[in-house]
Every structure is written in structure tokens, then in C-alpha cells.
Amino acid sequence: MAMADFKSVFPEFEGEDKLIAAAKHISRELSSNKGLTDEARRILINLGTQLSSISLTDETKSEKVCEIKMIENQLDSVEEKVRIWETDQSMIWDSGMDEFDEYLDAAEEARKLTLRLESLSLNQDEGGDEKNELQRKSYDILQTTMDRLEEEFKYILVQSSQPFEPEHMSFRSSEEDTLDESSMNSFGDDSVEESLQRDSLSRISDELIVDLVNPDVIPELRSIVNLMFNSKYDRECIQAYTNVRKDALDECLFILEMEKLSIEDVIRAEWGSLNSKIRRWIRAMKIFVRVYLASEKLLCDQIFGELGSISSVCFVELSKTSMLQLLNFAEAMSIGPQKPEKLIRIIDMYEVLADLIPEIEAFYVEESGSSITMECHEVLSRLGDCVKVTFIEFKNAIASNHSANPISGGGIHPLTRYVMNYLRTLTDYSETLNFLFKNIDEEVDQFTILSPESSPTFREEEKRIRLSPLAQNLMSVSEVLEGNLESRSKLYKDVSLQHFFLMNNIYYMTQKVKGSELRPIFGDGWIRHHNWKFQHHEMDYQRASWGPILSLLKDEGIQNPGSNSVSKIVLKERFRSFYLAFEEIYRTQSAWIIPDAELREDLRISTSLRVIQAYRTFEGRHSTHISDKYIKYNANDLENYLLDLFEGSPKILHCPSRR
């Protein structure tokens, strides 16, 4: 029976719901009749099933219509709350936590309503058009709330940022320039020893974490992040966070006085300016990595930690530019001119970066940070290569450092001071240099510290000693220096001054090794050999300088021909010649200088023992052969005059009063 026929037969059941109910009732009654055939019973059962299906469909449709209406009402309420804040230009955060929480709740409700609408599946006759319209409206409201929360998020980050004060960190920053001259010859006094001492840059043993953002606002920031991520606005959230924190990192580098310099800027910079920039870089790297990056990583974890790897992604994105800025400066230093005065600073940079790399790797463990750690290792390798090349240039510069004029007085040459103080400073970097130098001249794993000119005693002790890479290279530099000094000694026309000059300089080298950290590197054998060398030059000086004058105090040739009697004429000439020679030596060698007080005193004593003793003996032996008027100086006078030698101040002898 068709539904229309049914309605005509039973007009009292007008209304679709009532008709369906009546039909179901009739179907049940007929089905219970025992006289029905199986076919009739099957038809009635199918009719009952169809009627039930019609009833359920209408009930579902009614529920969906009600739900759409309820969502519409809720969405209108959310829209009204959002609209009120959109007409207000002030920040919700500034209105207090109640207002802020209320807005978060509204945004969360908009998100949930949007999800509910997305989950509804309605065709057109079930209210699909109304649902689509509401869905567009919910998207608009959600977009508005997300835009506002993004602005609030950035505002809170900025307003709650806490000042970074590196001046309170336990790092030393000095603007003193050390090797700030372009020429080795500019180092002429012991002040270079102090200026060459390695910086006492202190380091903190543990990470010093600071609160970059007020800890009280972290829960609210985390709430915004979670809401934006749940609303599928994760990219906007990450971008907002990284932009704000990038600016903060730029400010940190500005506070640390790190300029944005191109490689060309660094290469063209004067050494005095560059030296200061390197000092600031060393300090900045330590503070930036150990304090600022550590604190920034913690902040990322506090805000994004519940979102898995997102925290690492944000950290890499916000810190990459600043890290590369610092690494670019180090790279520029590694490819610039390899001047000897840069060596210490380059080693400092190498050690700082090598020391910090484990901490940097701990910050960038995710794949997203691998490019930064790789760049760190590449820059470290280039700095290491620069150290080796610069050291070789340092040695070459010593070998090629020549002058047409000798230094006055035969004292310690500025090059000697410079090189030995430089070598002493390099011992502070023994571990690093041993590592870097192990591949320089790798085929030479042994080095003979002895020379063919060694003394007999030294030859007996001669043996080959296995040396560290650092020892091999430092001793190689000292050999080049000695070769340079040998060449410089030839600039003196006076042979005795040649030996005097070498005695002074080799003694200085020996004392520098003996009294510093160079001693265990060079070894006692080297010291013994160089003690012998400077003593050898001392004896050569004595022979060249005093040998001729002492020959005047010998008896050969003062006898009269054909007898054993002393020729008074010859004797008087001997004394006169001796005094003239002594006065000339006095005039000349009082201008010579021995800077070391101990060496100066030792040489005076040894000279006095030879000269005064010979003079006193000669004078005493011939006191009866010559009148006192021909004795210009007595032994005590001469002994006192010897005390004026080697002071670097030329003097002239004045005849003392007669005895």
C-alpha cells in the first residue's frame, strides 16, 4: 500500500510522523496473525523494517539540525567576545590575567567549534548550506583569534624580556694590544715579555643559565603555543617566536661588541684594530655559547618542550644567523694574511672554538642543526691550518730579517728578545701545538739536539732523543735565530765585538730556556750545549780583545841585545803601549753593553783575573827597572776601571794623580 493511499484511507493520521507510527502499529498487528501465509508475513516484516528506517533517519536529521543551531548560537557568542577586543587597539595582556584567560578560552572555543563543524557530514536537505556558512564563519573567527594571539605572543616575549648583562659575567675583557707591531724589530725591551703573556681569560666551569624572559609568563606563552599548534597555526607561531628571539640575539651580539663584518672587512683591517676585535670575539664566543645559547635553549624547551622536536627546530632557526656571524669572523681570520704577530691570537681562537664545540654539538643534536656543527668543525680545521702556516711564516720571517747596520754596543738584539719571548708564550699552548704540529715534517720523528761543533764532553753525552712535535719545531726556530745572529755578528768589523754580541745573545737564549716552561721542552742537553757555546764566545772575546794587550806584559824582547839586562827604553815603551791599549779598550768597551747583571759581573771578574794579575806581576817584576813616573796606573786603578766596562756608556780615562 502506498503512503498516499494510506493517508486517504486513514485521514485521522495526518502528519508524516503519525502516519509512520500508525503504519508500524498495523504491521505489528498483522504480523502476529497466525493465519497469514509465509509470503504475506515476509512482506509485513520488510514493511516494518522500512518504516523503522524512515523513523531513524528523521530523528537523526532532527538532531543535526539542533546541533547546527546550537553551534550557531555558540559561535555568535564567541564572535561577540572577539569583536569587542578587535575594536580595542590595546593589548589584551595589558588588561590583566582575567581578560587574557577569557580571550584564550574564546579562542579555544572557536577552535573546538570549527572542529565540530568539520566533523559534521550533512547533505543539502539536512542543512548542509547552513553548515557550510557556519564553517566559513568559524574559520574567520579562528583566523582573527590566531592573528591576535600571534601579536599578543610577540608582545609578551618582548615586554617580558629581561636585560642581558655580560659585564657581570666572570670573563675578562682587555683592550690591550699584544703583538701590535708589524715589524719584529719593534720589540726591543723586556716589556714584550709581559705583553706576550697569554691572556688570563677566565672560564666558567658550569653553564651559567640566566632567565632571558620573566619566568612568570612562561605558562601563558606555553598556552598560546599549544593553542596555535592545535589550531594548525604552528608555522605562524614558530615564525613569530624566532623573529623576536633573533632580534634578542642580535642585541646580545651588539652588547658583546661584535660587529657584522664581511671577510673583506676583516682582511683589510689594521692589526691594532683586528687584535682588539679578536679579543672581543674570544670573550663573545664564551659568553654567547656558555651563557646566552644555553639560556636560549632552556627558554625554547620551556615554551615548546611539549611539542617534541619543535623546540630544537625553533632554536636552530633563531640562533643560526648569530652563530654563523661569529664563525664567519673566525673563518676570515683563517684566510687572511699569515703574519707572525697573528699567531698567538689565531691559537687563542682555535682553542676557544675547540673547547666550545662539544657544548655547541650538545645544543644542535637534531638533524636541523647539523649544518652549524659541520661549519664549526670546518672553521676549526681552517684555523688549525692557519696556525701551522703562520708558524712556518714566523720561522721564515726570522730567517729573512736582516739589516745593514749592527745594533750599537753588541747587546741583545730585539729579534732575539722577540723570538725567545714568543717561543716561551707558545709553551702555554703545548697540548694544542703538539696536536697541530704532529703532521708537520711527519717523516722526521727524531731530532738530534747536538751539533758537530759540540765540546768533547758534550760529544760523550751525544745521543738521539725522541722529541715532541712542539719541541722539534721550537728548536728549529731557535736554530734559525742562531743562524740569523751569526749573520748579524759579521756586521761588526771588530772581531772581539762579534764574539761579544754572540755571547750576549746566546746567553740570553739559554737563560730564557733555563728559567721558563721551555726547559722541559728543549731539555738539559740543549742548555748544556748552549752554555758551552756562549762560554766559547766569551773566551774568543777575551782572546781577541785582551790577548794583544796581555802580550805587552810578557818579558820576551825587553832584554838588551847580547845581555840579560832589561832595556829601560823597551820597558818604558811596553808600559806606554799597554796604557794606550788599555785606554782604547776602556773608551770602546765602556760603550759596549751586557744587559744581564750576572753575566756582566762574571765577565768583569774573569777579565780582571787575567789582566790585573798579569799587570801586577809584570809591574812587580820590573819595579826596580823603571821609575815610578812612568807608571801611569797602578793595579787597583785598572781594576776599578774595569768596573766601568759593559755599561753602555762611553767613557774616557783621565790620568790619576801620581802615587
Image (spheres, rainbow, N blue to C red):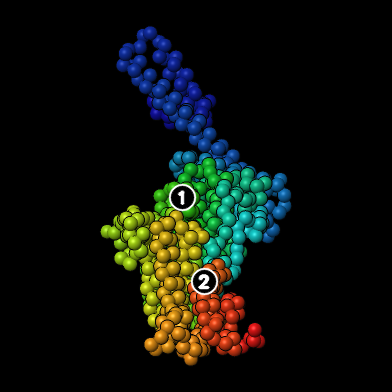
The residue labelled by disc 2 is 609
Asked whether residue 180 appears in the rendered view, the answer is no
Residue drawn at (30%, 65%), measured in percent from left and top? 452
Residue drawn at (53%, 80%), measured in percent from left and top? 619
Residue drawn at (57%, 78%), measured in percent from left and top? 635
Q: Secondary structure at mark 1?
A: helix
The amino acid pointed to by label 1 is Pro
Q: Position of residue 137 (x, y in %)?
A: 55, 50
Q: Nearer the viewer, residue 314 or 83?
A: 314
The amino acid pointed to by label 2 is Leu
Q: Is residue 560 above or below residue 26?
A: below
Q: Position of residue 459 (x, y in %)?
A: 33, 59
| Residue at the top extreme, as displayed | 34
Q: Position of residue 505 (x, y in %)?
A: 46, 72
What is the C-alpha distance between the residues marked 2 and 1?
Answer: 65 Å
Q: Which mark is residue 205?
A: none
Tell me the mark number nearer the camera, choosing from 2 and 1: 2
